[in-house]
Amino acid sequence: MSDSDDDDIPRLSSHTLAALQEFYAEQKQQSDPGRDDKYNIGIIEENWQLSQFWYSQETALRLAKEAIAAAGEGGRIACVSAPSVYQKLRALHREDFSVYIFEYDKRFAIYGEEFIFYDYNNPLDLPEKIAAHSFDIVIADPPYLSKECLRKTSETIKYLTQGKILLCTGAVMEEEAAKLLGVKMCKFIPKHTRTLGNEFRCYVNYDSGLDHEI
């Protein structure tokens, strides 16, 4: 092959090549996230058909710290339809508590034995290893803003918790949440990575740090 033939071969610019390598690296990470990365919020993309909206990093951290404080040393934490809080809890690399993620989306099965398949339509269809009233605190974020979804998720919450409840849902559900779970709205306002059409709030049934600041 002559030099002139070689010149005719199309070549990628360094910028394009770098972008392509970054794309392939992201694809590999999403299909097989590494141990250090698999708890990053966003490593599993939101599926809007499942009404998934992840918390911002700041909100996930605030809720995770609240859960740890409420559960206490050696406590057990259940994250019901709240995967970004679970991810933040595990990203903190603390071993002084146990945590489970209850999720319908089986992509979260990458978290092994801590993943529990959960369908709010069957609120008490849980594995035998999940005993009644075995969690110090339950953090729940019902996937749909409806009375039916909240009512069914509330059955799960009341089955799992020893007492403490941290509920995240729309402000319009305040009255229903109080009736079903005895929770009250907190001053802390959770934020998401995307802007939601409905005002979102946190509710608790215990003396919480979330109610001590705006």
Image: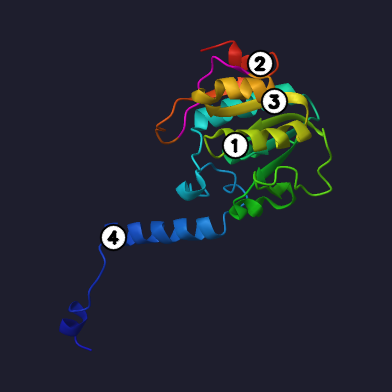
Tell me the kind of residue under disc 3: Ile
84 left or right, relative to 48? right
Please tell me whether mark 2 sits on a helix, a strand or a loop: loop
User: Which of label 3 and label 1 is nearer to you?
Assistant: 1
Q: Earlier in the sequence, mark 3 or mark 2?
A: 3
Tell me the CA gap for discs 3 and 4: 50 Å
Mark-to-mark CA distance, 3 and 2: 10 Å
Which numbered dot is residue 208?
2
Discs 4, 1 touching: Cβ within 8 Å: no
Which amino acid type corresponds to the residue marked 4 in the rendered image? Thr
Q: Amino acid at mark 1?
A: Glu
User: Around disc 1, counting alpha carbons within 10 Å, would you say few (fewer than 14), some (14 to 19), or many (20 or more)?
Assistant: few
Q: Find out whether the residues at labels 3 and 4 contact each other: C-beta distance under 8 Å.
A: no
Separation (CA) of disc 2 from disc 4: 51 Å
Neighbor class of circle 2 (other Cα within 10 Å; few <14, some 14-19, many 20+) is some
Is residue 90 visible in the rendered image? The answer is: yes
Q: Which residue is mark 4?
A: 16
CB of mark 2 within 8 Å of CB of mark 4?
Answer: no
- Within the image, what quadrant is residue 8 found in? bottom left
- On residue 165, which mark appears? 3
For mark 4, give the secondary structure. helix
How many numbered badges does the structure rendering display?
4
Tell me where the magenta segment starts and ends, as one range: 184-192
Is 101 colored magenta in this rendering? no
Q: Earlier in the sequence, mark 3 or mark 4?
A: 4
Q: Is residue 100 above or below residue 198?
A: below
Q: Residue furthest bottom?
A: 1
Residue indicated by mark 1 = 148
The answer to which image quadrant residue 131 occupies is top right
Extreme residue in the left direction: 4
Give the CA separation, mark 4 to mark 1. 50 Å
